[in-house]
Structures are given as C-alpha cells and as structure tokens.
Amino acid sequence: MKARLFIPLALFVALAVLLAAGLTLEPREVPSPFIGKPAPAFSLAQLEPGRPAFEPAQMKGQVWLLNVWASWCAPCREEHPLLVAAARQNLVPIVGLNHKDEAGAATAWLRRLGNPYQAIAVDRDGRVSIDYGVYGVPETFVIDRDGVVRLKHIGPLTPEVWQRDVLPLLARLKG
C-alpha cells in the first residue's frame, strides 16, 4: 500500500529529469532524417527570367550549399553578408531556394544586399521546402558531390557556425 504512494513521486522525478535534459539541448540542432541520404530532387523555375529551371542534378560532381531564404525574413538578412563573402571568395557554389516570396521583392532585396547565389530556384508554394524538411527560413544544407545531404543548419548562419561546422565539412568533402 505504501509503495503505491511513491508511484506518483517516481513519475514526477522521471519527468523532471527528462525535462531538465531537454533544456540542455541546442534547439537549432534538430536531427534531420536527410543527413546521409540523397537530397530530394526537384525542378523549379529560377528567379531570373529566361534562365532554365534549376534541378539539384545540375550540381552533381560538386560540393554545394542550398540556402532557403526569403526577402521578408529578418534572420535571412543577418546571414546574408556571410553568404556574399563566401561567394566572393569562391569557397563553394551557393544555390538559393527562394521560399514563398514575391519575385519583385526578392529581386529588389538581392539588388540592394548583393547576390551570392549561382542559381535561385523559386519555391512559391513551399512544397520543395517541405520535401527538405524546412521548419522555417533561413535553413542551409551542405550537399556533397554525389547529391547526398551532409549538413542541415536551421536558422541564420553565423561566423561561428561557418568556422566550426561548415568550413571543416567543406574541406573534408572537397578533400
């Protein structure tokens, strides 16, 4: 009988331990089911009129970044100078996936802030973003020469993330 009284206490302690462990996790490091798997295929029109549709297969044989962004996204503005600098240094081809944006607003944004993208696929309805498991913009994927996703970063890229996670991975993949 007395043991029954301790069951709620034991359940409470177990729940408290689980919640405390959860508080130590980094919220931007959500495990992605795509890591180590082929990047989802798609074919989308590009932002720049007259350019052919973009397909990830066009990047086969190259290590590249897929950056999901939008002109209405404040965190995208935060990471944008880092992407522009990387593009100027020719560190890695960067492809943009413009997420649920107005073409005019996206074009004006790039004109104002610089265009780091080799190609910009337009995901007007967000279906490709859903296929990539995008939670919100910005998100960035590192994709290897074989079209396999090697890294997913949720949120804006920062100089720390770039130095700690992205550059070493790029060096290893290009190795």
Image (spheres, rainbow, N blue to C red):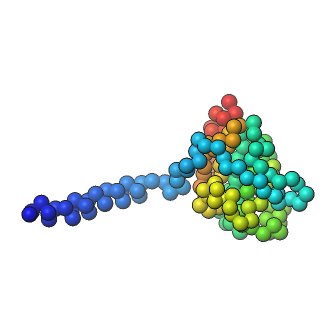
Residue found at the far left of this picture: 1
Residue drawn at point x = 73 percent, y = 52 percent: 42
Q: Which of 148 and 105 is in front in this view?
A: 148
- The N terminus appears in which quarter of the rendering? bottom left
The reply to whether residue 81 is in sight is no
x then y, percent, for residue 153: 60, 51
- With 142 as the anchor, is 101 left or right in this view? right
Image location of residue 40, percent across then percent down: 67, 49
Residue drawn at (25%, 61%), measured in percent from left and top? 11
Image x and y of residue 97, in percent: 73, 57
Figure quadrant of the C terminus: top right
Position of 153 compared to 55: left or right?
left
| Residue at figure coordinates x 74%, y 65% from the top left | 124
Q: Quadrant of residue 156?
A: bottom right
- The total number of labels drawn is 0
Q: Nearer the viewer, residue 117 or 52?
A: 52
Q: Is residue 44 above or below residue 38?
A: below
Describe residue 100's horizontal placement relative to residue 34 as left or right: right
In the rendered image, residue 4, in percent from the top left (x then y), is placed at 14, 63
Q: Is residue 169 visible?
A: yes
Q: Quadrant of residue 171?
A: top right
30 left or right of 158 in image: left
Q: Is residue 87 above or below residue 2?
A: above
Residue drawn 64% across the image and 56% down it: 131
Q: Quadrant of residue 79?
A: bottom right
**Residue furthest to the top:** 175
